[in-house]
Amino acid sequence: MTAMPLPTAASLYDRVQRVIPPIEWPVFSQDIDAILKLKRERDAVILAHNYQTPEIFHCVADIVGDSLALARKAMEVDAEVIVLAGVHFMAETAKLLNPGKTVLIPDFGAGCSLADSITAEDVRLMRRRYPGVPVVTYVNTSAAVKAESDICCTSGNALAVVESLGVPRVMMLPDEYLALNIAAQTDVEIIPWKGHCEVHERFTPADIRELREAHPGVTVLAHPECPPEVVAEADFAGSTAAMSDYVGRHRPASVVLMTECSMSDNVAIDHPDVDFVRPCNLCPHMKRITLANIRKALEENRHEVTIDPLVAERARRAVERMLAV
């Protein structure tokens, strides 16, 4: 039997030609070929979040998705090395679920405004203020914060997680807007924290009205990290995976995704018949991950993610409880 030819940068360009001009491709192709070779040599896989740029998401990643998908698929990884093309809390989650594997993040500076908005001590203080109330923690948090929690959630499963607890009241940390948007869908009383995503908090209802005026008939999809008044103006609200699924199911003539810029590029590649209007708020943390530093991570084994074993044990329990819902 003839072996299938291995992919090369040249063979992958067709996949992204609608969003990457030919003049830019030579800048990427050398790193792509090197990364493909290094993955084979090191028995490595690359997990990439939906907010990664197309040359990463569509050309070198092995597993792609939102936070929930990456968390689930990380548990199925056979490779010895995991490179997380995303932000630091995602790399920590991959390490929690794969404690015996080497997990690398190409840039330790790839953080998250939500993760930075709360500490483990904050959670302990909240528990003292609301004794006996369960803590539901968004995955966009450090392992130390997860370790102080009862269960984790993502934007895709937050409602199911909250209602799975069977209690009248929960604390939901740290995204205030996600908490308020979930509170509108359930009878469970939700106590929020004042954390916000620096990408999603900038969208406004006026933005949506202006987009509708400029693009009559456009379908507006919003991420639940957006303010509730933005979600109320949208046609649909859901996680990045849910937004992608919506486009695939409904095939709107034109659509705008009220989320991070690269998400539109990545979904557009799979739906050439849909016109994507791009309001474009970039996540500066996601954009710290590049082909060049993914290559360096594999060449030099940098930067390895480690977690204190006592913290990891408790944080893993919260993530596993989420995955069981």
Image (cartoon, grey):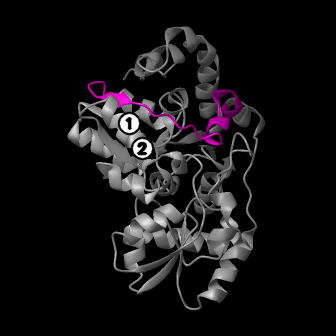
Q: Is residue 156 above or below residue 315?
A: above
Whether pointer 2 and pointer 1 mark residues with C-beta atoms closer than 8 Å, the reply is: yes
Left or right of 87? Residue 23 is left
* Residues packed near mark 2 inside 10 Å, few (<14), some (14 to 19) or many (20 plus): few
Name the amino acid, label 2: Ala
Q: Is residue 225 above or below residue 193?
A: above
Q: Position of residue 93 (x, y in %)?
A: 60, 58
Residue behind mark 2:
206
Q: Which mark is residue 131?
A: none
Label total for image:
2
Q: Position of residue 296 (x, y in %)?
A: 73, 32
Q: Secondary structure at mark 2?
A: helix
- Outermost residue on the bottom side: it is 131
Q: Is residue 287 above or below residue 90?
A: above
Residue closest to the eye, 269 or 315: 269
Q: Position of residue 41 (x, y in %)?
A: 64, 32
Q: Residue at x 60, y 66 (%)?
A: 194
Q: Is residue 133 magenta?
A: no
Name the amino acid, label 1: Glu
The region drawn magenta spans 270-294
Q: Residue at x 38, y 78 (%)?
A: 164
Residue closest to the eye, 64 or 148: 148
Q: Residue at x 48, y 46 (%)?
A: 203
Residue behind mark 1:
210
Q: Position of residue 132 (x, y in %)?
A: 55, 91
